[in-house]
Image (cartoon, rainbow, N blue to C red):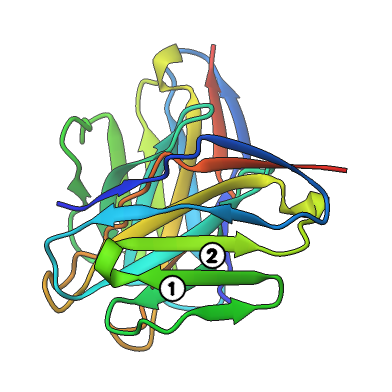
Amino acid sequence: AQKVTQAQTEISVVEKEDVTLDCVYETRDTTYYLFWYKQPPSGELVFLIRRNSFDEQNEISGRYSWNFQKSTSSFNFTITASQVVDSAVYFCAPQTSPISNFGNEKLTFGTGTRLTIIP
Amino acid sequence: GAVVSQHPSWVICKSGTSVKIECRSLDFQATTMFWYRQFPKQSLMLMATSNEGSKATYEQGVEKDKFLINHASLTLSTLTVTSAHPEDSSFYICSAVRGDTVFQETQYFGPGTRLLVL
């Protein structure tokens, strides 16, 4: 079974500050996937990124960047120059690889980090 | 993109009635869809996995006779809350799996349905 810990329950930062959301996961799989989703106040989960465990390159997408450290089982998410629209709950979620468990694409959701950007 | 819709977005019903929620993948086909529920300020709890053409797989503790799931086509899954009671009031979210190969599969979520049982 997989497990994910998002130790930061709530974070508040002033607009334009950078903020990093931590994610630590546990898995017995040698191959797996990691996801980040954003849930704004409207409730709809928005897909942000999917990372394969065998690809340890960090990724940048606009103001978003992700730092994947397989050795420490962490997949942290940084927002640069935060904006009020970034206010949301962010979920980190590992997923078993279909290689290990074909047909079972279940995500394991953490408790989420509620991010508030103060204007 | 990958668009998933849910209908209705809001439903208020009396205790004892049944409520059907639809989940549709609008621009892709989804062999697999998932149903979650979420209580205020909590994480998502997986209720069941819905596979097109076969019976749904329910998570432990989820009553299959209470929450009926039908995945009738590659773009539609329905969740029926039978004989709803106030404790069933929650935010129900579906997701649909999209991917050209098993190595690219990603869950895309619907906007959710808020159910209030009086």
User: Which chain is indicated by disc 1?
Assistant: A
Is B64 drawn above or below residue A104 in the view shown?
Answer: above
**Which percent across, then down, holds residue B107?**
42, 65
Q: How many marks?
A: 2
Front residue of B49/B19: it is B49
Residue A113 tag number: none
Can you identify the residue that label 1 sits on? A50
Tell whether label 2 touches label 1 (CB within 8 Å).
yes
Q: Position of residue B78 (x, y in %)?
A: 40, 50
State the residue position of label 2: A47
Q: Is residue B110 visible?
A: no
Label 2 crowd bin: few (<14), some (14–19), many (20+), radius 10 Å: some
Q: Tell which of A29 and A81 is nearer to you.
A: A81
Disc 2, SS:
strand
Residue at the far right in the pictured view: A119
* Residue A107 visible in image: yes
Q: Is residue A19 left or right of residue A69?
A: right
What's under tag 2, amino acid-wise?
Phe
* Nearer to us in this view, A108 or B102: A108
Say left or right for B43 vs B110.
left
Q: Quadrant of residue B84?
A: top left
Q: Residue B33 location, x and y as percent? A: 35, 60
